[in-house]
Image (tube, helix red, strand yellow):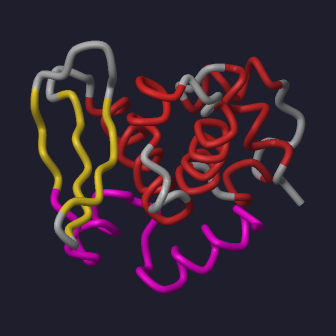
């Protein structure tokens, strides 16, 4: 599965990189609620896609969490990661990394990177407001 291609196709189809606008167009239910122990999660329930986001997060983090959970929805719909984490003790790191990679590809375009090719990872991190490890994931997919 090529995450970068999936994101480019999604952006073309919906004409935006804003995950909230995309999920609105897809009729996804968004629930803002004070969550404990997680920033957000995705659930497929009774043929409905539902994304839960901790309402106490700053807007910038809500945007990332929404993009991350959209990645789970599109790439891991059948994987109940909450069940796998809490009941089976299976390692779900692969799913989380893929969702992070999806989110970063959605939120940071190639053009945004091209404008600053001389920047270091740390400078990109400060500019975009995301952790270094997330920036490193995004730069792996850069042309």
> At x 37% / y 30%, what residue is drawn?
61
Looking at the rendering, which quadrant does residue 124 occupy? top right
Residue 48 percent across, percent down from the top left: 20, 68
Looking at the rendering, which quadrant does residue 41 occupy? top left
Q: Is residue 81 above or below residue 10?
A: above
Residue 135 percent across, percent down from the top left: 71, 32
Quadrant placement of the C terminus: bottom right
Q: Is residue 61 above or below residue 27?
A: above
Looking at this rendering, what residue extends furthest in the front direction? Answer: 88
Residue 125 percent across, percent down from the top left: 66, 24
- Residues drawn in magenta: 1-29
Q: Is residue 95 left or right of residue 118?
A: left
> At x 34% / y 69%, what residue is drawn?
22
Asked if residue 25 is among those painted magenta in the image, a careful observer would answer yes
Provide the major secondary structure of the magenta segment: helix
Q: Is residue 105 above or below residue 63?
A: below
Looking at the rendering, which quadrant does residue 137 occupy? top right
| Front-lying residue, 140 or 91 | 91
Residue 77 percent across, percent down from the top left: 45, 62
| Front-lying residue, 141 or 47 | 47
How many numbered circles does the render carry?
0
Quadrant placement of the N terminus: bottom right
């Amino acid at each position: 599965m090529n995450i970068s291609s999936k994101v480019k196709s999604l952006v073309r189809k919906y004409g935006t990189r804003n995950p909230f606008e995309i999920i609105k167009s897809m009729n996804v239910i968004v629930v803002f609620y004070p969550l404990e122990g997680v920033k957000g999660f995705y659930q497929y329930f009774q043929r409905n896609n539902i994304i839960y986001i901790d309402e106490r997060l700053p807007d910038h983090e809500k945007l990332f969490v929404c993009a991350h959970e959209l990645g789970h929805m599109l790439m891991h719909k059948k994987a109940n990661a909450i069940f796998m984490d809490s009941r089976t003790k299976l390692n779900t790191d692969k799913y989380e990394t893929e969702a992070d990679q999806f989110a970063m590809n959605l939120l940071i375009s190639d053009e945004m990177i091209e404008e600053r090719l001389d920047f270091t990872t740390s400078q990109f991190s400060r500019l975009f407001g995301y952790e270094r490890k997330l920036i490193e994931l995004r730069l792996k997919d850069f042309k």
